[in-house]
Amino acid sequence: MGRTRKHVGRHGHASSSQASSLARIDRHERNAALQQKAATPPPRETKRYFKVRVRDAGTLEAGLLPTDTVLIRLEGIKARKADETCKKESGKSWPCGAKARAALTLFIRYRAVTCTVPPGGETRDFAARCSVMGQAPGLGDATRRRRA
């Protein structure tokens, strides 16, 4: 059987050329791991809001008193204004903004809304990704229910 030989110096250690190549591999692996860790953004802080009101299909208001009301614009949702109307292919107009607002209101249903806090901290008006019991608002539920 052929065995691989390890070159060992006088003191029982690998030669300096082997040790430097081993150190070089460890350093490259460590640098790659550090770069990957740096590329992964830290999770953003979240806050739970109660008694949330839907202003339109892309904007929420949270707070008990008018002085402490926070306006949250939902990131990732292109929303219609509540009073906006749309036209069908047939030319008939329909209240698409009111329907979108009603769908978001139905989705939230008096439950708490959890939103990411902006990097600088909460302000009176900010954009955030929000969810209700782990589900993000979107077309999913209300559209599926209507089509079924």
Image (spheres, rainbow, N blue to C red):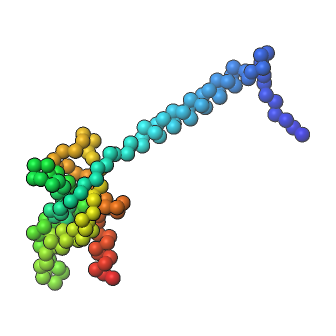
**Residue toward you, 50 or 84:** 50
**Residue toward you, 83 or 115:** 115
Is residue 105 depicted above or below 10 in this figure?
A: below
Residue found at the far right of this picture: 1
Residue 147 in the image: x percent, y percent? 30, 81
Q: Is residue 146 left or right of residue 8?
A: left
Residue 60 in the image: x percent, y percent? 19, 58
**Residue toward you, 4 or 107:** 107
Image quarter of residue 73: bottom left
At 69% from the left and 20% from the top, the residue drawn is 16
At 18% from the left and 68% from the top, the residue drawn is 101
Q: Is residue 34 left or right of residue 94?
A: right
Q: Is residue 122 left or right of residue 28?
A: left
Residue 53 in the image: x percent, y percent? 17, 62
Q: Is residue 82 visible?
A: yes
Residue 42 in the image: x percent, y percent? 38, 42
Image quarter of residue 129: bottom left
**Residue toward you, 10 or 73:** 73
Is residue 69 depicted above or below 33 in this figure?
A: below
